[in-house]
Amino acid sequence: MKTALTFLSFLLAFAAGPPAVFSQESTKSGVATEGEEGPIAHHPAGDKKAYSAYAQRDFPTRVFFGDTHHHTANSGDAFMAGDRLSPEDAYRFAKGEEVVSSTGIPARLSRPLDFLCISDHAEGLGIMYQVFEGNEAFMKDEVIASWNKAMKDGGKAAADATGDIVVRQGNGTLPPLIKDPKTVGPIMKSVWQKYTATAEKYNDPGRFTAMIAYEWTSVPGGNNLHRNILFRDGKDKADQIMPFSAWQSEDAEDLWKWMDAYEKKTGGKMLAIPHNGNLSNGLMFALTDFKGNPLTSDYAKRRARWEPLHEVMQTKGNSETHPTLSPNDEFSDFGVAGWEYGNLSLTDKPATPEMRPFSFIRGALMNGLMLEQKLGTNPFKIGMIGGTDVHNSLTSIEEDNFYGKLPFQEPNTNRWEHVSKVGFGKTRYTWHYTAAGYAAVWAKENTREALWDAMMRRECYATSGSRITARFFGGWDYSAEDAKTRYLPSVGYAKGVPMGGDMPKRPDGAKAPTFLLSAMKDALGANLDRIQIIKGWLDKDGQTHEKVYEVAWGDADKRPLGADGKLPPVGDTVDVANATWTNTIGDPDLAAQWIDPDFDPAQPAFYYTRVIEIPSPRWTAYDCVRYGIKMPAGVPMKHQERAWTSPIWYNP
């Protein structure tokens, strides 16, 4: 009975409407459904007109799940790898329709997405279709002609040719003809205008958002510095420009200048989301600019303005942290295997522990505290967001419904062992790829403007592919009782700031910040193991530190916190042989109030929450069962899905 009522509320919410209704709050400490008694929402004292807990409510009440990083056949590498699905196919799939994949497999989501940002590469947008068709202008070049043959041959030849493009993009040896403005300009303009028209066709404010976006693909030396550019605007403004590409400049500062010019020209708005920094070999969050010069105050202001978020999770692994960066974090190895060898193309040089503070978000958040004291602005004041980076037009990333990143990684008996890259004596296989991740956005409505505004203020979070609902607030006077109310968001906003914000000024007499946090399981997913708070701070000597705190956890009566602050494992119900698990451990929802026990008012700090599920089968386990195959012992069959909220910052 301990979880029956709580889980019933999930089922009722799921039956009542689309996935967004999962944001209806209920907490383990004070589970309440409509009609039950509970604390009354806060109203101004003496306001006789105030009765409804929901009247005049002016904060986001729904979380919207979507993908901010998605490629279709308009992306050159996706088309070369065999993707033949258009943006129209991608939108139809995201809205819940069944489509047939490029390899001929019927595909459908368990639940529709709320929004999709198709972010095809600006570099050669739509050009590979012309190469495939044998456009005479391109067949004059031997390299391009070889790509044509590889695409016609398919299989390994097409995969190798796709890798060739990535390497050539990184080392600057792409054939000049493929970048010739006279040859490709008219083609790309036509593709872009059709691209924006398709977004308009499928954009359905209030129900489904098709946000116009594209990818700027800077990859110097194979080091991943990509950014996704998201428009707040529609076709009328987006068509006034052609996307700025890495063929014009691989320096992000030039991209920001172009974004600024767009806003001044059109009156529109843009933001950029850098990709997973784990494959940047220490360049994503370097303490120098693209030219190697020390960061300046002007650089810090511009980066903070244009890049409020960072992609923490996608198919190419996890960029939160790494065991060598966070040796005392027992969950720091998630999504690391296969992606720690080196950069995107396994060229340039192997990755080293010294690079990791400048490749992973936790290191960047800590260095940002230091840079703010030095420069006056924190260039790495970034929120968390997820994306997939799929290159097959299918945002299909649930573990039991994973269609891979590329067409040749779509479901088949031997996809797990397909070689993705070889370098430094290391090999990346398809089994290294993770089924991930989602962007979760707290917005007032499902529209381009509301979602974009929420991203800009960093009121969003990332998941590894599960639709966990998470809330996080920071203030100075949250009480333990506040975590028990079903009006938790009302209290959260009334007394403090949500994820992505800055702590209010410390009141006189306040000893330490207080935080209010809650999480609910995915209605179709695994129970929750725990919620943690990760804190980073800067001491008086300018040294950075980090600590992981256990704040709320499932089966609390059976798992007392140890004297060392560690929590016993939640257990494991996974049946690998059948790719199943049971929700007999953990809890469906958790909530807590937490006070920082180590607070020093003189030390700048950041805090974010990490929500972790109980163990569940990985996509590799589902492949083994469905295809009747065996994989070597080193291939993981289970893991613990999770979510990461955007931080809250404290400034003395």
Image: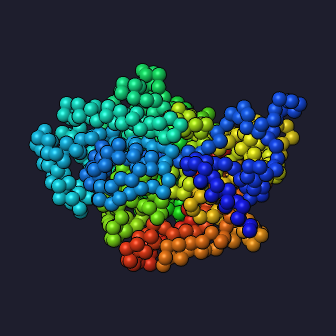
Q: Quadrant of the N terminus?
A: bottom right
Give me the residue at 29% from left, 59% from top: 104
Which residue is at the far right? 46
Q: Is residue 5 above or below residue 543?
A: below
Residue sitting at x 31%, y 45%: 86
Relative placement, left or right, of 8 versus 74 is right
Residue 297: image x %, image y %? 55, 32
Q: Is residue 379 left or right of residue 91?
A: right
Q: Is residue 572 visible?
A: yes
Rendered position, 63 above or below 7: above
Instruction: Give how far across and how far down residue 7 sits, in percent.
Output: 67, 61
Query: Image quarter for residue 423?
Result: bottom left
Q: Nearer the viewer, residue 272 or 105?
A: 105
Q: Quadrant of residue 549?
A: bottom right
Residue 338 on image: x %, y %: 42, 64
Q: Is residue 69 left or right of residue 12?
A: left
Colour scheme of the picture: rainbow
Left or right of residue 221, residue 511 in this image: right
Seen from the viewer's position, the closer of residues 641 and 170 is: 641
Is residue 349 in sight in this rendering? no
Q: Quadrant of the C terminus?
A: top right
Residue lying at 75% horizontally and 53% vertically, measured from the top left: 32
- Residue 240 place in picture, x, y as percent: 36, 24
What residue lies at 33% left-to-right and 71% top-to-bottom?
413
